[in-house]
Image: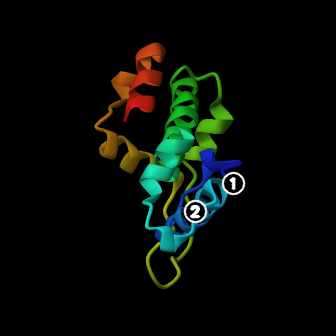
């Protein structure tokens, strides 16, 4: 269900859809109906799995920061150019699509992380898992 989620600039409606699909799947796995009045949080604890939002954040932070560190070392110049690419021309009506960089910045803020935290890989992995 989360294959390739490292590069998803997720919209709010996509988050709601993912959450709904996860809840349905967890209830099916536990053989619990809605009328049984058991919370999804209790069911996830019973299965030992995390919320889909935290897993998405972990995947994005793990992958995108690794790419960012490579870009700082100038070893992946093409990747750096692709991450910083901006489309030319007039913008269409409505709000612009969220970029992967914007989504990762929101993940940083939600977990109270900084770029300096990522320089120590062991500490970084622990911060991502605990958040």
The residue at 54%/37% (across/down) is 64
State whether residue 50 appears in this view.
no
Q: Nearer the viewer, residue 131 or 61?
A: 131
Q: Quick check: 126 above or below 43?
A: above
Quadrant location of the N terminus in the rendered image: bottom right
Quadrant location of the C terminus in the rendered image: top left
Residue 124: x percent and y percent?
A: 43, 22
State the image quarter where residue 109 is shown.
Answer: top left
Q: Quick check: 127 above or below 10?
A: above
Q: Which residue is mark 1?
A: 1
Residue 65: x percent and y percent?
A: 51, 32
SS of the residue at dot 1? loop
Residue 92: x percent and y percent?
A: 53, 81
Q: Which residue is mark 2?
A: 32
How many C-alpha atoms fall within 10 Å of the one at disc 1: few (<14), some, or many (≥20)? few
Q: Quick check: 48 above or below 7?
A: above
The residue at 46%/14% (across/down) is 122
The residue at 32%/46% (across/down) is 110
Cα separation between marks 1 and 2:
21 Å
Q: Quick check: 63 above or below 1?
A: above
How many C-alpha atoms fall within 10 Å of the one at disc 2: few (<14), some, or many (≥20)? some
Task: Give me the disc on residue 44.
Answer: none
Report the side of 129 relative to 62 (left or right).
left
Q: Nearer the viewer, residue 15 or 31?
A: 31
């Amino acid at each position: 269900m989360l294959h390739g989620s490292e590069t998803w600039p997720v919209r709010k409606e996509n988050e709601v859809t993912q959450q709904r699909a996860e809840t349905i799947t967890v209830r099916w796995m536990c053989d619990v109906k809605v009328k049984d009045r058991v919370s999804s949080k209790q069911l996830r604890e019973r299965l030992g799995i995390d919320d889909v939002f935290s897993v998405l954040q972990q995947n994005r932070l793990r992958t995108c920061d690794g790419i960012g560190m490579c870009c700082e070392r100038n070893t992946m110049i093409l990747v750096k150019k692709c991450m910083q690419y901006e489309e030319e021309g007039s913008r269409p009506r409505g709000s612009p699509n969220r970029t992967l960089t914007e989504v990762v910045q929101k993940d940083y803020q939600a977990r109270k992380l900084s770029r300096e935290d990522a320089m120590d890989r062991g500490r970084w992995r622990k911060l991502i898992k605990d958040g």
